[in-house]
Amino acid sequence: MSEAVIAINAGSSSVKFALYSAGAAPSRLMAGQVEGIGTAPRFSAKRTDGTPYPGQKFDATPFRHDDALRFILQWIEAESGESIVAAGHRVVHGGEKFARPARLDAAILAELDLLVPLAPLHQPHNLAAIRAISALRPGLPQVACFDTAFHRTQPRVAQLFGLPRTLSDSGVKRYGFHGLSYEYVSGALPRVLGAATQGRVVVAHLGNGASMCAIRNGLSIASTMGFSTLDGLLMGTRSGSLDPGIILYLLQHGFDNAGLNRLLYKESGLLGVSGMSSDMRDLLASGDARARAAVDLFVYRVAREIGSLAAALGGLDALVFTGGIGEHAAVVRKAVCDQASWLGIELDEKSNELGGPRITREGAGVSAWVIPTDEELVIVRHTLAVVAAG
């Protein structure tokens, strides 16, 4: 039985996983998820070549996250013959303290519990998965990999809000997210950009959750997401940046905390603007004017933030698209590049339609690229390194 490491991303109604070989050069063996937890739970998984394993459905009650993890661990070892020797977890918030992955124990879990108010829709589920595996496999090493850690290199001025210092000192500041994705892309830049790797790069992680990051010399300089995962770009169901006065207005007109959470996290974004769907594929396929308006706003916000991040970098050498929309929606990439052409981006339409990797003409003042992300591989690499270090 060979050894493997599992990367886990637990959400409110799903547990996603990817299995990698354990070794100096981890390779993906399979990936899957249990989704619909609490409603109609079902399991699906795929081999590395994309062919699916047989799916499975479960009784909705009382099927919980620990039931999902128990099934996943047992299914992997029965189906693959691999022995799981460590588990790595995506943990959304590491606060100021956790700037690198950490081997999990009771003391660190207690510290991460204190960060739940900073990411109430993500952190509790991330930590619940860790505790579930501790109960299911008490001796299995577990490592937390933080979505905020990559951004701890940002200068202090990029982290501050215009709020009283007492609030900043208590943790109300810009943290940035999607750091595992940006870390992967940053590590992939040398094979794509060569000498330009050390230059000024904006990476657009565009998916159901979307953000952008300014990177110089491989380090995060600024990002569109700030204190929470609501900030910045329009997303699938999240609003993106808002005038704070809107929140005050809504509070004065009958919204409470629960209503605001539902509105801003679940009912806004592409879904709210279109009134149709949170899925970019649906909107691009629709001829409805409302769908067009949602896509146009999404593109506008991305193009506008490119300018903002270029200002933070003092210029721009390269733009990188990643994430589900960034990697697969050529129409969106074209629209963004057209609106950002003033920066020196000259799109090669044929290359863009083919998905890159380079999607701009040779000699363009600013090059643009498509780099598929692999957050799970980053988690596995960190997990192996942390466990090896003891």
Image (spheres, rainbow, N blue to C red):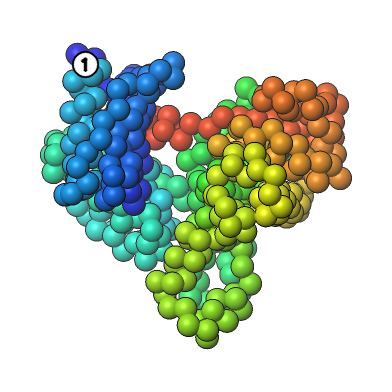
Residue at 43% across, 29% down: 377
Q: Is residue 384 above or below residue 225?
A: above
Residue at 41% across, 63% down: 118
Q: Secondary structure at mark 1?
A: loop
Q: Amino acid at mark 1?
A: Gly
The image position of residue 318, as x and y in percent, is 73, 36
Q: Mark 1 sits on what residue?
A: 81
The image position of residue 132, as x and y in percent, is 19, 45
> Dividing the image into 4 quarters, which one contains the N terminus?
top left
Q: Is residue 27 above or below residue 181?
A: above
User: Given the current orientation, which residue lies at the most extreme bottom position?
Assistant: 252
Q: Nearer the viewer, residue 86 or 234?
A: 234
Residue 97 visible: no
User: Given the current orientation, which residue lies at the most extreme front position?
Assistant: 288
The image position of residue 328, as x and y in percent, is 61, 32
Mark 1 Cα-neighbour bin, 10 Å: few <14, some 14–19, many ≥20: few
Q: Is residue 224 above or below residue 134?
A: below
**In the image, 141: left or right of 312?**
left
The image position of residue 127, as x and y in percent, is 28, 51
User: Given the current orientation, which residue lies at the most extreme top position?
Assistant: 1
**In the image, 339: left or right of 110?**
right
Q: How many circles with numbers are drawn on the protein?
A: 1
Q: Quadrant of residue 57?
A: top left
Residue at 80% across, 45% down: 340
Q: Is residue 293 above or below residue 344?
A: below
**In the image, 285: left or right of 339?**
left
> Dividing the image into 4 quarters, which one contains the C terminus?
top left
Q: Nearer the viewer, residue 259 or 109?
A: 259
Residue 324 visible: yes
Residue at 22% across, 46% down: 60
